[in-house]
Amino acid sequence: MADDLFTAETTVTGSLTYDTSIGGSATVPQLLITKITITGSTA
């Protein structure tokens, strides 16, 4: 799986804020994955 390429169908369920290693914070979308399809490989 490390070299797989994939497409994911997702639903945005909110946001997630976390502390960074340099003392700040970052906010990213929180996703619910509903389907994953393997589309290829980089290996």
Image (cartoon, rainbow, N blue to C red):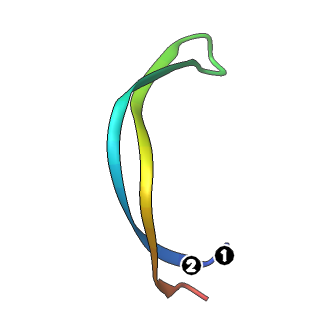
The answer to which image quadrant residue 3 occupies is bottom right
Q: Residue at x 35, y 52 (%)?
A: 10
In the rendered view, does 37 fall on the left or right side of 3? left
Q: From the image, which quarter does the N terminus lie in?
A: bottom right
Marker disc for residue 4: 2
Which residue lies most toward the front here? 34
User: Callout 1: helix, strand or loop?
Assistant: loop
Query: Which is more toward the observer, 34 or 18?
Result: 34
Marker disc for residue 43: none
Q: Are marks 2 and 1 in contact (CB under 8 Å)?
A: yes
Amino acid beneath label 2: Asp
In the rendered view, does 37 fall on the left or right side of 19? left
Marker disc for residue 1: 1
Q: Position of residue 39 (x, y in %)?
A: 43, 84
Q: Position of residue 27 (x, y in %)?
A: 42, 22
**Distance in Å between CA atoms under marks 2 and 1:** 5 Å
The answer to which image quadrant residue 32 occupies is top left
Depicted 9 relative to depicted 16: above or below = below
Amino acid beneath label 1: Met
Q: Residue at x 42, y 57 (%)?
A: 34
Q: Position of residue 43 (x, y in %)?
A: 61, 89
The answer to which image quadrant residue 7 occupies is bottom left
